[in-house]
Image: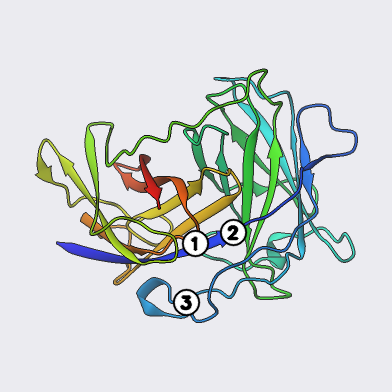
Amino acid sequence: MKLLHALLITTILTTGAAAYAAGDHAGGHTSNAPAATSMSHDAMGHGGERMEVMAAQNMVKLALEPAAPLQAGKTTQVTVKLNAVADGKPLTLDDLKEAHTKKLHLLVVDPTLTDYHHIHPVAGEKPGEYVFDFTPLKNDTYRVWADVIPVATDKQEYVQTDMGTPAKEKASIDKATSMMATVDGYTFTLALDGEPKAGSPVMGNVTVTKDGQPFTGLEPVMGAFAHVVGFTEDYNSVLHVHPMGKEPTNDAERGGPKLEFHIEPEKAGFVKLFTQVRIGGKDIFAPFGITVK
């Protein structure tokens, strides 16, 4: 049985309203890269090595341009544009460092915090452009955080913007506590060793079972056996949990059934957590809900 440990890294992203990208009529937006970080410079990551240092102010500008208006259940190609804030220079893959097996991660979620996507766009036809296919479950805006490490700064950045058209009625978040989720026949159970409080540490773990039995067939996903991402009820903050301990060294290794992590939320309120694992070549996202006092 492999036991994974994880350290919570809380990145507080404070932004103003995203401006619409010039000339875009499909719900695209652009972000002018606000300052954003709360991660300690000596935070530890996979296997206990030094985690990426967060930038004090983002140096990357993010814009999203869907090829057509987003519609629930319909797949639309979206173009991502990454440029340097200082001079507008397009940022290619050569300008980005790899983190967790990819150079560009997008964390995407709707205002209800239910439809979460972890996306890795591929390089487009023009420098600094990347594309991905997106199928929303909601007719609403989606908030997108780009997780990148520019080579020029060697500092991790989370750049935030929106895409899509706001729903006619404002979405509400179900803030009920949820400690168990069943997805594709697998049961995920979240346990905490105390009440989560702002500024105080609490240990937690997620256990995966199948038909009531511990499941030890978790496949490597982005260099680990699991990843956990959380979103706060203000729809403006990301909690990213990185597994620690032994990492898989090849695709044949398997992990599970338990993932342990340490969480120290910075502010009170509801948090929606998603545990991402890979089983049978498919990425599975198990949702949980906790309230921080």
Work out which residue is located at the far left of the displayed protein and give it.
213
Q: Secondary structure at mark 1?
A: loop
Work out which residue is located at the far front of the displayed protein and give it.
293
Q: Residue 138 sits in which quadrant?
A: top right
- Seen from the viewer's position, the closer of residues 140 and 66 is 140
Residue type at mark 3? Ala
Which residue in the structure is indicated by mark 1? 266
Residue type at mark 1? Glu
**Mark 3–mark 2 distance (CA, rounded to whole Å):** 16 Å
**For marks 2 and 1 on the same chain, the one whose residue lies earlier in the sequence:** 2
Where residue 92 appears, as percent x and y from the top left, is 74, 59
Where residue 93 appears, as percent x and y from the top left, is 68, 61
Q: Is residue 127 visible?
A: yes
- Tag of residue 137: none
Q: Is residue 256 visible?
A: no
**For marks 3 and 1 on the same chain, the one whose residue lies earlier in the sequence:** 3
Quick one: label 3, few (<14), some, or many (20+) residues within 10 Å?
A: some
**Mark 3–mark 1 distance (CA, rounded to whole Å):** 15 Å
Which residue in the structure is indicated by mark 3? 43
Decide if residue 198 is on the left or right side of residue 72.
left
Residue type at mark 2? Ile
Name the mark nearer the viewer: 3 or 1.
Answer: 1
Name the mark nearer the viewer: 2 or 1.
Answer: 1
The reply to whether dot 2 and dot 1 touch (C-beta < 8 Å) is yes
Which residue in the structure is indicated by mark 2? 12
9 vs 52: above or below = above
Quick one: label 1, few (<14), some, or many (20+) residues within 10 Å?
A: some
